[in-house]
Amino acid sequence: MGPAALAQVLSPLTGMFDASTTPNLLVGLDVADDAAVYRLDAETAVVATLDFFAPIVDDPGDYGAIAAANAMSDIYAMGGEVVLALNIAAFPEDLPPDVASAIIAGAAAKVAEAGGVVAGGHTVWDAEPKFGLSVLGLVHPDRILTKAALQPGDALYLTKPLGTGLIVSAARQGKADPGWVAGATASMARLNRHASHLARGANLKAATDVTGFGLLGHLWEMAERSSVTVSLDSGLVPLLEGAIECSRMDVHTGGEGRNREWVGDHAGFAPDVDPAIAALLFDPQTSGGLLLACPANEAAAFEAAFMHDGEPLWPVGSVEAGSPAIVVS
């Protein structure tokens, strides 16, 4: 579902659970973020999210692992640590049991890698398979990362390359090199856990994960909620192997179009921005990377920490004072 449609669907809940009646709901629908956060006491808050989708790769184990990594990413985007997950499964009645088992096993292994535990779930019959997780995490109430905390002078970073949407679509059309699909699969299955650890260690305040709204859609959420102008250097944005080739083959997704429509004139493009790269900036990602903001005077130490631990990190832009907008060069 696109951002505009989602906002309309959720509109009846707006204001129903606000701070005056639910003071321990630290992050909810009033200022929607990657996950909900509910304070238990002065030291502990619960981070809650859920996500599920239809298969995007052929291997059932990979599908389960990607679905789990994608769901847990919301916890990491809020600065939390995963502790508990429940399966959400909708499988066809004629799906072979070993396939269903492989999906669930792939997800469970990824949750175990994250230091969490799968403790149950719910399964229904459906003509099209769908799978995901409801995930609970923990975070200190004073250490929450949010979309609304960008500050002028921040440097912006990505922790994974873009292109999963176009590569998966190209694969379905028989246009993708197997190596491109393997690279995209590995990227989607990689956890954002340690990147989140490093962000917390640097005392960052602003973050999100890049998923269905694409890089520009999620960046617009941050700019609007933080009341700042964001500058993005399209030449610095990392791309998966094969992503630019898919874009130049005129491969598109429905999500790209919805993201373009939603961001609209809030993003301005310099005349020399490559249209193929521009399309990838709107490409909906599955289990994409974290988009992190670090004060410029701390950026060198932040980059050094990622380099020391062998964790990927790409500088992609900066934050300036001004009306909410994105300037793409």
Image (spheres, rainbow, N blue to C red):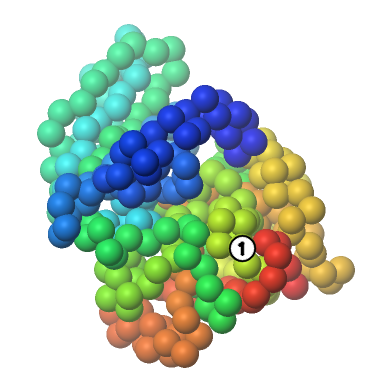
Identify which residue is drawn at 39% across, 25% down.
Answer: 130
Q: Classify residue 301 as left or right of residue 150.
A: left
Instruction: Identify which residue is drawn at 25% across, 30% down.
Output: 87
Specify the quadrant of the image occupied by residue 108. top left
Image quarter of the C terminus: bottom right
Q: Nearer the viewer, residue 177 or 321?
A: 321
Q: Mark 1 belongs to which amino acid?
A: Ser
Residue at the location (47% across, 90% down)?
A: 297
- The picture places residue 77, in percent across and down from the top left corner, at 38, 57
Residue 234 x/y as whole percent: 68, 70
Q: Residue furthest right?
A: 271
Local packing at callout 1 (Cα closer than 10 Å; few below 14, some 14-19, many 20+) is many
Q: Position of residue 38 (x, y in %)?
A: 26, 45
Q: Quadrant of residue 42?
A: bottom left
- Position of 1 with respect to 208 (left or right) is right
Q: Give the residue at mark 1.
A: 227
- In this picture, residue 316 sits left or right of residue 279: left
Q: Quadrant of residue 86?
A: top left
Residue at the location (79% across, 64% down)?
Answer: 269
One can see residue 34 in this view:
yes
- Name the residue nearer the viewer: 254 or 25: 25
